[in-house]
Image (cartoon, rainbow, N blue to C red):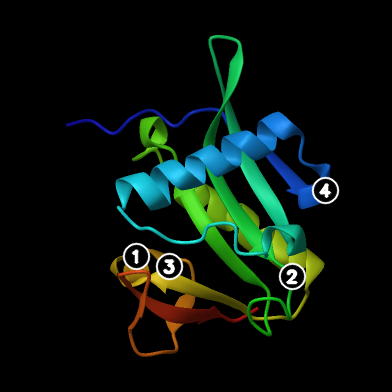
Amino acid sequence: MSTPAKPQVAWQWKRFAELKPAELYALLAARAAVFVVEQACAFQDADGLDAFAWHLLGWVEQEHDPTLAAYLRLIDPGRKYTEPSIGRVLTTAPFRGTGLAREAMREGLARAAALYPGREVRIGAQQRLERFYAELGFRTVSAPYDEDGIAHVEMLRSP
């Protein structure tokens, strides 16, 4: 089985208030598709943190129509954790296996470093993705815990 070709992605950073309705719809639909439908996880996605986050949207042109391929949010320090936090990391189904999640995380970490120099970044990672985040420089700093029926761990990345 061959690896899908890496698509050309247009990365876009926006604060919540700057998101156009179509962009907001696309990111909420992607989050629902991945976290609610695919992972069969009933949880409150609208957690009150979107207004205090930078949103990274990765768009791919498909037949002259931009399609959301990857997404994450970078939450301001002091909102979820003391540190800035990256979460809701996803790649939409047609673009999985292309390295976009890793690319999105690199974009997120670069943005965190630029906005919050010298600060650690904390994440609440699904435990099954612990190795993925460790490869990006995160270290596990908590025992596993249940969040919405999925095992998670807190992880930190030094600046």
As drawn, the label of residue 103 is none
| Residue 110 lies in quadrant | bottom right
Q: Which residue is mark 1?
A: 129
Q: Are marks 1 and 4 in contact (CB under 8 Å)?
A: no
Residue 100 seen in this snapshot: no
- Residue furthest to the top in view is 63
**Comparing labels 3 and 4, the label whose residue is closer to the camera:** 4
Identity, as a three-letter code, of the amino acid under mark 1 = Leu
Identity, as a three-letter code, of the amino acid under mark 3 = Tyr
In-image side of 83 versus 97 (left or right) = right
Task: For marks 3 and 1, give the CA distance.
Answer: 6 Å
In the rendered image, residue 83, in percent from the top left (x then y), is placed at 67, 81
Task: For marks 3 and 4, give the CA distance.
Answer: 29 Å
| Residue 159 lies in quadrant | bottom right
Task: For marks 1 and 4, give the CA distance.
Answer: 31 Å
Q: Are marks 3 and 2 in contact (CB under 8 Å)?
A: no
**Comparing labels 2 and 1, the label whose residue is closer to the camera:** 2
